[in-house]
Each structure stands twice: as structure tokens, then as C-alpha cells.
Amino acid sequence: MHPAARALIFLVAYAVPALARADQPPLAEAMKRGLVGKPAAARTLSTMQWNREQRAALDKSEALMQRALREPGLLAQYETMRERYAADDNRVFRMVFGQYLSWFQTFVGDYDAARASFSIAQVAQPDDAPAPAADGFNAVAAADPILQLARGRQAIFFNESHSAPVTRTLTVELLAQLRAQGFDWFAAETLSPASAKDLEHGYPPASSGFYVNEPICGEMVRAALRLGYHVVAYDAEEGDSNARERAGAQILYDKVFKRDPAARLVVNAGFSHIQKSGAHLGGKSMAEVFHAISGIEPLSVEQTMLTEHARSADDHPYYRAAMAAAHPNGPFVYANAAGNVWTLKPGRYDVSVFFPPQSSIDGRPDWLSLGGRRQPYALTDADCLQRFPCLVQAHYAAEGEDAVAADRVAFEAASHSRLYLFPGSYRITALDRAGKIISERAVHIEAATP
């Protein structure tokens, strides 16, 4: 089974509102446990028929992705996934396959399409904390409060939504400042067990992990390497969900703290793997097991629940209220005068991060600038030489051909777009569907004028 098949496959909002939450079980587990309800369009189906359709959709989605991965290159893989989605209008299939498709859409830089293909509705829940404004909290930029919370801690766990790379941006931003605080180990769920050898050259190749193929995820791993973190993989590939949580926690302890009891660790994981308490697939989460094994309570930073959705009705009510008030331009949290921070899920997570609505230019979201540190670089379809579809990507000039691109844009027809790049030298390469080079040129991105 491909590593991506072990990701959390959640139900989209229009299908099962009660389960479409970032702290709910993955689809495969929910089906096994009989927790999945029926959308209005499926009310005529018996429970047995509904469960059977979902299992069939999951099996079909996995088979289609495995077939796509045999295509020669990322563009062909993406186009194949898109074509398979368009060819089947079965609502249950699209509910499941939409998440698979969304991963490949992020890989080729089409983040708006990924958000439309898959997102998790955030409905108000009984265990939500009171709204932050009601308790005297004010919105402040996320970096400083989180860095203050991290002081003296041995482990900080960030989560992400694999289909929404905006939830990786704050982690990328904070890695340098956490390194300055003394954090010296970095672990990411996406990294494969064999990634240690893959990362020896100091940059992330595509072979180092499935989600690493998304450019912001690649920048996260690249930043950790450049900053001198010891980078490790921890995710377990075999066993059921509870076995995976236990094994991942044990691997983190064995690879990091068993070797270096004074280590300070930053972890990037998906969704509820970082929750510190509460039911998790009938067992305990990776973070809770890690605490029990190591005696180290991680700082848990939740980043997946308070984001903008393709449909505003899917936003959490607190999110809509926060966006209607004054707030920072980038990721923010709520803090009070006493220095306390607000969390949507007390006891489960230590702090909740809000990501403001994006603005897009040429179809590319503004958060790709990573707080203004990456510069926009205008593109047209000229690199494609009228051969469509075409994938235009930028690689760091000093890195090998196997490196994950710094940014990518897919052209389906004559158009214009932009890349977002750190100052430095790059190779801009255009590839056709067969993975053949159409054109290649060198560019240098200057630092922005203060």
C-alpha cells in the first residue's frame, strides 16, 4: 500500500456533516466501525448498501492512484487523476477520490482546486471552548505567542491538513526561530523510513516522502536541513490505526530521546495525531502515547480547524466571527493580557491557529509568499512552446534534478501565472505530459527592496 493510503481520509461536509471534522476518524476506520452516516442523496440506500458503496469507492480510489503513480512524471500523474475524477460522477466516489485528487493538485501548485476537491467542514461542537472574544482574548500574530510557549519545552508538535498546504506555512516560518531557541531535531510524518539516505545531499528529493512533493512541504524539510536540525522519519507503515499511533510514538522516542535525553524536538504530523487527550480511533493518539512513553508533554499546536473553506458555510462559526473583526494579515492566535492563549479544544490542543482568507493573483494564493520572504516571479505559457498540458517548475540551481521543486504551475492552455521564490538562483524548466523537457532557462531572484 502506498504511504498516502495511510493518510486520514475524512468525509467532506456535504456528505456527512457530523463526521466531517479534523478530530474525527479516517474514512476507512469509520466505515469499519459503522460510524458513517448517509447524505440526503443516499437516503434510499440501506445502511448495508451505503457502507458497501463507500468501501468500493475507497478501494477504487486506491487502485486509481496506484495506476496514476505508474505514469511517467508528476504532470501525467496529475492529469490521470483529474481525468478519472471527471469520468465518474458517482457522489460517493467523488467524496472519497476528491481527497486523493487534492494531493496531486497541491503537488502541481493548484491550491484553489485542491481546496474545492476536498475540505473538512468545521461545525460547532459541544467540546468547543467559548468564543475567544467572549473571554477577553485578542487576536495577535501567531509567531511570538507560540515561541513563548515553546520556551523550556522539549517537544512541540504542529499538525497540518495534507490537502491545504497553508497549514504548513507557519511551521516553515517558525523553524529558524525554534532552532535559535535550541530545538535541534525535526520529524515529519511524510518522510519515508528510507529518507535518511535520500536527505544526505541536504535537500529533499521526491523519493523522501509522498507529501514532500508539494513545494511548501518540500521547503519545510529543506529549511530543517539548512538550519542544522537532525531530520528523522517516524511514521509506521504497517498495522491498524492504533498500532500506527503506538509505533510512531515509540520510533520518535527511540530515534530522538533515547539517543539524546536533552534533545528538543519539532514534529509535523497530520490532523489529530497531535491531540494530547481524548478518544482517537478507539485508542490513543501518537502524541498521547509519546507523552506516556517519554514522560515529555508536547506543546500541541492545532492548525487545521480554523481555516478558510471553499464554501464559507463550512467555516467554523468562530472563524467567520474572527474574520469579521480586525485581525493580523497572517496566521494568528488569540491571547489575553495575562499571556494565556486560546484553544478551540481545551485539553486536546494547547493553542489554535487561525489562517486568514487568502487573496489570489493569477490564480495563486498570497500565502505562497511565506510572509513576504518569497518573491513573485511572473510566468506566461511561453515556456511551454504551445505544448499543453505543461508543467513549469523552479529548482534551486545548486540542487540535483531529483530535488522537489521550489514552486510549480501547471498550464492547460495559453495563460499567465506566477511562481513564488526565495532570493537566489534557479532553473526554470517546462515539462510535457510525458515528462520530457520542453524548455529550460536560468533565472536569479533578487531580494525585495526594503
Image (cartoon, helix red, strand yellow):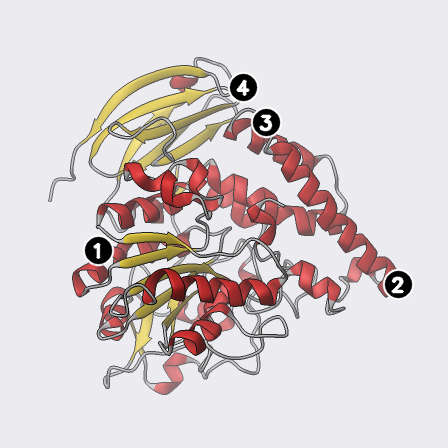
For the residues labelled 2 and 3, the Cα–Cα distance comes to 38 Å
Q: Earlier in the sequence, mark 4 or mark 3?
A: 3
For the residues labelled 3 and 1, the Cα–Cα distance comes to 37 Å
Q: Which residue is mark 3?
A: 71
Classify the position of the C terminus by image quarter: top left
For the residues labelled 4 and 3, the Cα–Cα distance comes to 8 Å
Eye-nearest disc, 2 or 4: 4
For the residues labelled 2 and 4, the Cα–Cα distance comes to 44 Å
Label 3 Cα neighbours within 10 Å, binned few <14 / some 14-19 / many ≥20: some
Label 2 Cα neighbours within 10 Å, binned few <14 / some 14-19 / many ≥20: few
Q: Which residue is mark 2?
A: 46
Residue at (70%, 40%) from the top-left corner? 63
Residue at (20%, 36%) from the top-left corner? 423
Do labels 1 and 4 touch, CB within 8 Å?
Answer: no
**Which of the pair 45/139 is nearer the observer?**
45
Q: Earlier in the sequence, mark 2 or mark 1?
A: 2
In the rendering, at what x and y percent does residue 197 appear?
A: 37, 40
Q: Which residue is mark 1?
A: 176
Eye-nearest disc, 2 or 3: 3
